[in-house]
Amino acid sequence: VEEFNFFKRKNKMSIIQNTEYKNWLKDLKSKIQQSQIKAALAINSQLILLYWDMGRQIEEKQENAKGGSGLINQLSKDLKTEFPEMGGFSAYNLRYCKLFYSFYKTLQFAHNLCANWKLMKISQIQYGNKLFPN
């Protein structure tokens, strides 16, 4: 039995030291990193569309409301209460959503931006101080 256990340990060590295994592990790590980056990009593109649409709706509500100047402050309070774990709903940021929409009023811009992100090569994406290779 002891001889069998020694053989099993030796066999496991040779697999881990095997060049084929090391290459496979390297490829697997690369795929995991690429998937993480793609997920972050998908989230970012959805957030851009969300902020654009929030800006559109804020502009429309302010145009239709009498004395709409308090709308953004109230919306900020309500969104912070409903989504306390999320940031980005300060009155200051909501004004920027409206400004973002005002600057890019055609929805085509937002869709083009998101499409371009999806086409970007992973090697072109910088995250923090790291540049992820292909």
Image (tube, grey):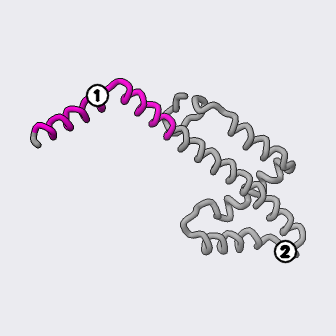
Judged left or right of residue 71, residue 130 is left
Q: Residues within 10 Å of mark 2 (few under 14, many from 20)?
A: few
Q: Look at label 1 and name its amino acid.
A: Gln
Image point 30% across, 31% down: which residue? 15
Q: Verify whether residue 7 appears in magenta.
A: yes
The correct choice, above or below, for 4 with respect to 20 in the image is below
Viewport quadrant of the N terminus: top left
Image point 52% across, 31% down: which residue? 131
Judged left or right of residue 32, residue 2 is left
The disc at residue 17 is: 1
Q: How many marks?
A: 2
The magenta segment is 3-32
x and y percentages locating residue 111 in the rendered image? 79, 45
Tell me which label, 2 or 1, sits earlier in the chain.
1
x and y percentages locating residue 93 in the rendered image? 67, 58
Q: Secondary structure at mark 1?
A: helix
Image quarter of residue 63: bottom right
Farthest residue, direction left: 2
The disc at residue 113 is: none
x and y percentages locating residue 5 in the rendered image? 15, 40
Main secondary structure along the magenta-highlighted residues: helix
Q: Which residue is mark 2?
A: 67
Farthest residue, direction right: 64
Image point 56% across, 69% down: which residue? 84
Q: Look at label 2 and name its amino acid.
A: Gly
